[in-house]
């Protein structure tokens, strides 16, 4: 199915749904952008599409880095105030 979408109050399209999803993923279209299917008359927010919008790449959680552990390093306590420095 093809859709029109509105940018700066100007209708653009029609474009395939997958292309509309791509515009969302690259930030051209937002969840609030008004869209209407080709032949339709009621403009609705992109977020109401069925199927729903696909997640933008930028909102995907980054991969978890591997856990790096270090051996415990003994730490000497700080000298008390007024004490001579250790030799």
Image (tube, rainbow, N blue to C red):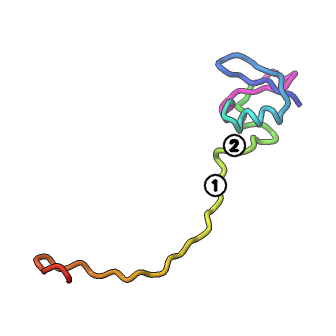
Please state the horizontal and vertical placement of residue 14, each as a whole percent of the image.
Answer: 83, 22
The residue singled out by tag 2 in the image is 56
The residue singled out by tag 1 in the image is 62
Where is 72 relative to 2, above or below? below
Helix, strand or loop at label 2? It is loop
Most foreground residue, 70 or 34? 70
Where is 63 relative to 82, above or below? above
Q: Residue at x 68, y 22 (%)?
A: 7
Where is 55 relative to 1, above or below? below
Q: Residue at x 65, y 58 (%)?
A: 63
Front position among marks 1 and 2: 1
Which quadrant would residue 2 be assigned to in this image? top right
Where is 80 relative to 58, above or below? below
Residue 68 left/right relative to 21: left
**CA–CA distance between discs 1 and 2?**
13 Å
Highlighted magenta segment, given as a residue range: 29-42
Most foreground residue, 56 or 30? 56
Q: Residue at x 64, y 44 (%)?
A: 58
Q: Magenta includes 38?
A: yes
């Amino acid at each position: 199915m093809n859709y029109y979408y509105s940018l700066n109050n100007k209708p653009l399209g029609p474009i395939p749904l997958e292309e509309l999803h791509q515009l969302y993923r690259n930030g051209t279209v937002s969840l609030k952008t008004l869209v209407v299917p080709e032949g339709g008359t009621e403009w609705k927010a992109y977020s109401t599409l069925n199927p729903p919008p696909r997640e933008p790449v930028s909102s995907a959680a980054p991969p978890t880095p591997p856990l790096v552990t270090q051996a415990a390093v003994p730490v000497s306590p700080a000298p008390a105030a007024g004490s001579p420095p250790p030799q």
